[in-house]
Image (cartoon, rainbow, N blue to C red):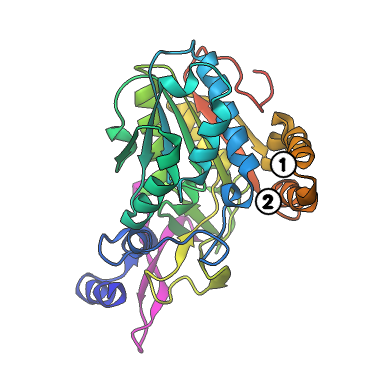
């Protein structure tokens, strides 16, 4: 079991970082959460926007099609999705984007997925689209050329580190064992040079403040910057988190749509942490990318025509009017996903402002 292996590792080498714990719990190829489960859906552990409504994926498809036109309609491009779940968003996106002549024919669909279980589901979901699908393990393995990259609830799954302010130093918050061999948080050594990973706004936070470090975000940004320096590209991320950097512990575990203790039974629950959009944008600008947003999910979807699409669906299926209304509410209401979830676009220099964002 993962828990046994993690305990052995802590006994042998001492406390481990939260990032190392998350990596094992989520991505272990034999027993990791994503490697062994199909966790998405009403009867599983959590539900995502594409599973709530077809309208979400349809608008993402039209957004991608407009971005393709903004890039000059390349005859071939990589349509990439990071962490594509059950493949629902991509299937809906491709269906909607068929209304734009040439887009689907030019698209080479690439899915970046760590879960063997989900790859099988994605193949089944996307089979009827007729699209040629390629799976790769990392962004750097996507074939060269122009690219449009989509990532819905991808960044929140990347392993995070945490640090606590003590005196003049930030100390890493780590995971050790108590007397009963249960996993517990412990205070580790000073971060040293890694203190630069703390979001700039938080570096002078008061004593005992907790800050989260997201090195995985920077790796994604660096990969995109390297790619977009060679060919036109645009990336859209949809995730939950604050627009400006905040202190506080946001690590959470979700199982059967309920929060559970994050250190309990690693490998059996989803582990996520809120995305720091301010820090993400700063890293992207430092890497030479153009940043649009963040904007709230509610504003973005309404701006792209969600309500008009819902009205058209109601007209085609009047008996489902209440269903479509509830879907719009869940996606856009501030008390649901409308405000907590945000979107940010990263792209190469020279492209016009992306759909759904203010003019640059």
Q: Residue extending furthest left? A: 12
Q: In terms of secondary structure, where does tag 2 sit?
A: loop
Q: Is residue 295 above or below residue 286?
A: below
Q: In this view of the protein, which residue sits in the foreground, 313 or 331? A: 313
Q: In this view of the protein, which residue sits in the foreground, 8 or 66? A: 66
**In the image, residue 234 lies at what x, y percent?**
48, 25
Disc number placed over residue 337 in the picture, else none: 2
Q: In terms of secondary structure, where does tag 1 sit?
A: helix
Label 2 Cα crowd, 10 Å radius (few <14 / some 14-19 / many 20+): many
9 on left or right of 319: left
Instruction: Tell me if label 2 and label 1 are in contact, CB under 8 Å.
Output: yes
Label 2 to label 1: alpha-carbon separation: 7 Å
Disc number placed over residue 298 in the picture, else none: 1
Q: Quadrant of the N terminus?
A: bottom left
Magenta highlight range: 164-193
- Which residue sits at x=29%, y=27%? 143
Q: In this view of the protein, which residue sits in the foreground, 153 or 315? A: 315
Q: Is residue 48 magenta?
A: no
Magenta span dominant secondary structure: strand
**In the image, residue 239 lies at what x, y percent?**
56, 46
């Amino acid at each position: 079991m993962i828990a046994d292996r993690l305990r052995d590792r802590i006994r042998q080498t001492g406390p481990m970082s939260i990032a190392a714990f998350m990596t094992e719990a989520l991505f272990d190829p034999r027993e990791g959460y994503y490697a062994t489960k199909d966790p998405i859906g009403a009867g599983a552990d959590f539900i995502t926007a594409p599973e709530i409504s077809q309208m979400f994926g349809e608008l993402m498809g039209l957004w991608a099609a407009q971005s393709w036109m903004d890039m000059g309609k390349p005859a071939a491009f990589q349509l990439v999705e990071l962490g594509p779940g059950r493949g629902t968003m991509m299937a809906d996106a491709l269906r909607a984007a068929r209304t734009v002549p040439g887009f689907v024919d030019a698209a080479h669909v690439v899915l970046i997925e760590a879960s063997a279980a989900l790859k099988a589901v994605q193949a089944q979901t996307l089979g009827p689209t007729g699209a040629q699908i390629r799976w790769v393990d990392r962004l750097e393995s996507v074939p060269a050329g122009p690219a449009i990259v989509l990532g819905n609830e991808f960044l929140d799954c990347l392993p995070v580190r945490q640090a606590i302010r003590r005196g003049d130093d930030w100390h890493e918050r780590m995971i050790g064992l108590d007397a009963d061999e249960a996993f517990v948080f412990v205070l580790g050594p000073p971060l040293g040079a890694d203190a630069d990973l703390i979001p700039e706004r938080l570096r002078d936070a008061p004593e005992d403040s907790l800050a989260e470090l997201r090195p995985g975000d920077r790796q994604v940004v660096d990969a995109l910057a390297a790619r977009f320096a060679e060919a036109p590209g645009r990336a859209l991320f949809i995730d939950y988190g604050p627009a400006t950097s905040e202190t506080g512990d946001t690590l959470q575990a979700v199982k059967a749509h309920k929060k559970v203790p994050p250190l309990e039974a690693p490998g059996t629950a989803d582990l996520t942490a809120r995305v720091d959009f301010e820090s993400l944008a700063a890293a992207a600008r430092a890497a030479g990318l153009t940043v649009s947003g963040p904007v709230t999910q509610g504003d973005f979807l309404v701006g792209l025509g969600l309500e008009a699409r819902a009205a058209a669906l109601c007209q085609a299926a009047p008996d489902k009017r209440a269903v479509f209304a509830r879907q719009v509410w869940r996606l856009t209401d501030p008390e649901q996903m409308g405000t907590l979830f945000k979107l940010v676009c990263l792209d190469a220099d020279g492209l016009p402002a992306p759909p759904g964002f203010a003019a640059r």
